[in-house]
Image (cartoon, grey):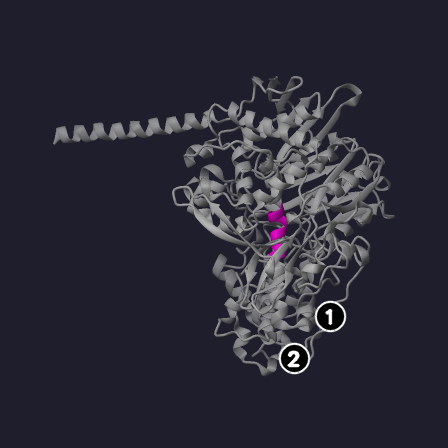
């Protein structure tokens, strides 16, 4: 027995030692893939030595004698810090993730491959002028030298047992293409849902349920849109329908509509003490680890010709995305215009159309790690692929991304602009997903336009919920002289927040691709208007504004129902204690939000069921209507019905609108008790704690404690400037006045480095979460790497 125990103890010790050796080997391998922070390194093809420094946040400051050296060095550091994320972006756009990650991503690749984006971007690259090709070539050279300079392949490839493939110039265009998917695919998917919805409901009811605007609009030109009148009892009468239509379950309780987008605003020199304009910008995206953005400062040239540019870059792309160069500052929000069309392709052989007869069939092969290659068939018209079908038709997508000139590197030249006019001209030539481009200069000017190539339509875009005839598709780009522009308004302020920007001719050019409601934009506008003079801190404070102004009327409506039942009374007691903000210790915001959502869900589903003209064919109603998500602008018809209270629109079996609303409050009460145990514990912070994860922890949850950012309650919500949900929100916050960058502010979510052993992994994330303003410019140097040819 003693011998057995001794042998067992030796075996256990050996196992422990082996595990320790394996862990040490893994740790050493990971350390070997860390970027070099200090000392000297070679970067061939440089025209002159370059200095690269990092501060305590990991902000990379590059000092180069010329722009090509600066962009080559940017490629070098992007590869060392973020190559894996760059690789995922290019592969995602091209539908090539499965070659690296295996069958788990095959369905994603099948969807993306139908767009044949690698082939399209290779064609775009051939059209690029020599200057842009040289710019891309310098960046690509820097990327591959940076990757090869690591002592070991990036750590993610060690885990995946794969080798990183070199970067190519077309890959940078694919990263831009991936941003098109991120920012516009929801719009064209939403438009197709609208096509089905219009077929189901008819024109009158569709236009009522899907209004273009209403009282929350905050357009730059002050234009307003009237909402449609409520339908008459002859059009919809819920009293004549089965009561079961009013008992639909609704969606996932607590999840309201989320629109990817951003905020930006600016004030002109007349509104500042120093006479220079100030710009604020926060781009709203899904949040992850590391951040999508990379804090960067470029200093190019020497002496009087020196140009310093500070802001954020996008790894994979040779450009400063948003920032300031001493003369001009610029920022984006997603525009949500109609940059696409759906075209009907009849299936019937007896229906011959030029589009149907021109369909080409292509074969695409998807490589799958650890499995057999998968071949898919892509049916494609001259203007784009067939992506949807029903019994009678196929539907092909004509997307501006597919057209020659849709993707280029012209945006990189904005960092050299000296005036807002120069910045506007470059923005209008740039090949990126269409953005509300806001720019401000040190002379006090400010301006807005659409950034990106706009399709020139012979007539305004077709109505929402309809397809476009193939012969009505745009065939050219809109000339810059015809772009909508707003410059130096009399009140000295501009703002955008993904809602409708203009009426009239400007609206006809932009079209409608899923605008937000406008409450957020209106709150920003009003905050700016409240003070005759503003500074950087005042603009930053607006970025952190978590007042629930939009939900105030829903709170008042709920409070009017206190006498309906005990559950309503309990909720009303909490609402009366509410401070009117989406703060983490508040229960009132959560109640008002949930009451609104539950009420809208029930009205939406019930009205859809009542107005549905197409046979359900035995399909469950909840499933049938799940594809039709209510948007923010459903607020308009719903609130009008709650105000006018027509009995023919009242969900059955309720006898009055108060009874219906009190039932929704009771539902909210029970859900909150079930989720939190008591109303006092049902704070907004518990519902709105961050869940900002690394891609690996999503697939391997046991890695979460090592890779993810801590889950922490946060203030903010939709329909207010401080947009914040657990996984979505302001990816960065920038405030800067050109020429006063020393007073500029920049915070970034998710951290700077992609390596968990880096001192900059997660750097700056807690400041972003706490709303602590951190400097735009690089701080005290902590590390210096000298690069020489």
Q: Nearer the viewer, residue 187 or 371?
A: 371
Which residue is label 2 attached to? Answer: 647
Task: State the residue at coordinates (65%, 28%).
Answer: 71
Task: State the residue at coordinates (47%, 46%).
Answer: 365
The x, y position of residue 397, in whole percent, is: 62, 56
Q: Nearer the viewer, residue 260 or 397?
A: 397
Q: Secondary structure at mark 1?
A: loop
Name the side, left or right, on which 518 lies relative to 87.
right
* Residue 492 sits in quarter: top right
Find the distance from the CA under tag 2 to the CA under tag 1. 18 Å
Name the side, left or right, on which 696 lies relative to 453.
left
Label 2 with label 1: CB-CB less than 8 Å: no
Q: Is residue 648 above or below residue 287?
A: below
The x, y position of residue 182, in whole percent, is: 60, 48
Which tag, 2 or 1, sits closer to the chain's start? 1
- Residue 592 appears in the rendering: no
Give the extent of the magenta segment: 180-189
**Which of the image's four quarters has the N terminus?**
top left
Q: Nearer the viewer, residue 129 or 695?
A: 129
* Residue 306 sits in quarter: top right
**Which of the image's four quarters has the C terminus?**
top right
Which residue is label 1 attached to? Answer: 228
Q: Is residue 657 above or below residue 672?
A: below
Mark 1 residue crowding within 10 angstroms, few (<14) / some (14–19) / many (20+): some
Question: Which secondary structure dominates the residues rendered in magenta?
Answer: helix
The x, y position of residue 648, in whole percent, is: 65, 79
The x, y position of residue 482, in whole percent, is: 81, 49
Q: Secondary structure at mark 2?
A: helix
Give the label, 2 or 1, closer to the camera: 1
Is residue 135 rendered magenta in the image?
no
Task: State the residue at coordinates (42%, 35%).
Answer: 159
């Amino acid at each position: 027995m003693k011998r057995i125990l001794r042998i067992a103890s030796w075996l256990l010790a050996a196992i422990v030692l082996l595990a320790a050796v394996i862990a040490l080997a893994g740790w050493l391998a990971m350390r070997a893939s860390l970027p070099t922070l200090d000392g000297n390194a070679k970067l061939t093809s440089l025209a002159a030595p370059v200095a690269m420094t990092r501060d305590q946040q990991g902000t990379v400051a590059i000092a180069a004698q010329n722009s090509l050296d600066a962009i080559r060095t940017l490629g070098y550091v992007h590869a060392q810090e973020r190559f894996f994320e760059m690789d995922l972006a290019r592969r995602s756009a091209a539908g090539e993730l499965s070659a690296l990650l295996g069958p788990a991503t095959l369905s994603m690749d099948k969807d993306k491959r139908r767009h044949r984006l690698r082939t399209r971007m290779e064609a775009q690259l051939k059209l690029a002028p020599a200057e842009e090709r040289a710019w891309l070539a310098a960046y690509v050279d820097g990327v591959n030298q940076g990757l090869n300079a690591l002592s070991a392949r990036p750590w993610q490839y060690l885990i995946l047992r794969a080798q990183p493939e070199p970067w190519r110039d077309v890959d940078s265009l694919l990263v831009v293409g991936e941003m098109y998917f991120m920012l516009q695919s929801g719009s064209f998917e939403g438009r197709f849902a609208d096509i089905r919805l219009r077929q189901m409901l008819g024109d009158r009811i569709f236009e009522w349920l899907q209004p273009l605007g209403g009282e929350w609009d905050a357009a730059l030109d002050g234009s307003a849109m009237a909402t449609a009148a409520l339908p008459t009892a002859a059009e919809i009468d819920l009293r004549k329908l089965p009561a079961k239509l009013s008992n639909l379950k609704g969606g996932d309780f607590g999840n309201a509509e989320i629109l990817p987008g951003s905020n930006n605003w600016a004030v002109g020199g007349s509104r500042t003490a120093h006479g220079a304009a100030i710009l604020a910008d926060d781009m709203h995206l899904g949040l992850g680890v590391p951040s999508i953005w990379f804090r960067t400062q470029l200093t190019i040239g020497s002496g009087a010709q020196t140009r310093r540019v500070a802001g954020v870059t996008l790894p994979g792309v040779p450009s400063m995305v948003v920032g300031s160069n001493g003369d001009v500052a610029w920022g984006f929000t997603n525009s949500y215009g109609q940059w696409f069309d759906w075209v009907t392709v009849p299936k019937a052989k007896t229906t011959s159309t030029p589009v149907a007869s021109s369909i080409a069939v292509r074969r695409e092969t998807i490589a799958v790690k650890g499995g057999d290659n998968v071949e898919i068939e892509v049916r494609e018209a001259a203007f784009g692929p067939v992506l949807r079908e029903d019994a009678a038709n196929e539907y092909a997508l004509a997307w501006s991304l597919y057209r020659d000139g849709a993707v280029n590197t012209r945006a990189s030249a904005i960092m050299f602009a000296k005036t807002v006019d120069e910045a506007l001209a470059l923005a209008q030539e740039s090949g990126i997903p269409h953005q509300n481009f806001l720019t401000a200069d040190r002379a006090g000017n400010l301006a807005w336009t659409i950034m990106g190539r706009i399709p020139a339509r012979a007539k305004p875009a077709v109505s929402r919920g309809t397809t476009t005839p193939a012969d009505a598709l745009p065939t050219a780009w809109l000339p810059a002289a015809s772009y909508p522009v707003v410059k130096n308004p009399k009140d000295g302020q501009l703002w955008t927040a993904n809602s409708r920007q203009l009426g009239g001719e400007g609206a006809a050019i932009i079209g409608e691709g899923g605008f937000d409601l406008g409450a957020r934009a209106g709150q920003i506008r009003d905050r700016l208007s409240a003070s005759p003079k503003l500074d950087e801190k005042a603009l930053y404070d607006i970025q952190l504004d978590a007042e629930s102004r939009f939900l105030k009327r829903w709170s008042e409506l709920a409070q009017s129902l206190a006498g309906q039942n005990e559950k309503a009374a309990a909720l009303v007691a909490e609402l009366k204690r509410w401070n009117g903000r989406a703060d983490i210790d508040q229960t009132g915001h959560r109640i008002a939000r949930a009451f609104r959502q539950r009420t809208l869900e029930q009205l939406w589903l019930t009205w859809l069921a009542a107005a549905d003209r197409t046979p359900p064919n035995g399909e469950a109603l909840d499933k049938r209507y799940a594809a039709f998500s209510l948007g923010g602008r459903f607020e308009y018809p719903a609130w009008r019905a709650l105000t006018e209270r027509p009995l023919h629109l009242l969900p059955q079996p309720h006898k009055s609108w108060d009874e219906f609303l009190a039932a929704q409050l009771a539902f909210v009460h029970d859900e909150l008790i079930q989720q939190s145990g008591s109303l006092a514990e049902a704070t907004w912070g518990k519902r709105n704690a961050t869940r900002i994860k690394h891609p690996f922890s999503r697939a391997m949850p046991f890695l979460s404690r090592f890779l993810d950012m801590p889950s922490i309650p946060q203030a903010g919500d939709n329909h207010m400037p401080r947009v914040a949900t657990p996984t979505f929100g302001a990816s960065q916050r920038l405030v800067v006045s050109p020429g006063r960058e020393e007073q500029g502010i920049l915070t970034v979510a998710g951290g700077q480095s992609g390596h968990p052993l880096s001192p900059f992994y997660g750097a700056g994330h807690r400041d972003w979460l706490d709303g602590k303003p951190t400097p735009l410019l690089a701080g005290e140097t902590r590390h210096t790497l000298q690069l020489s040819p």
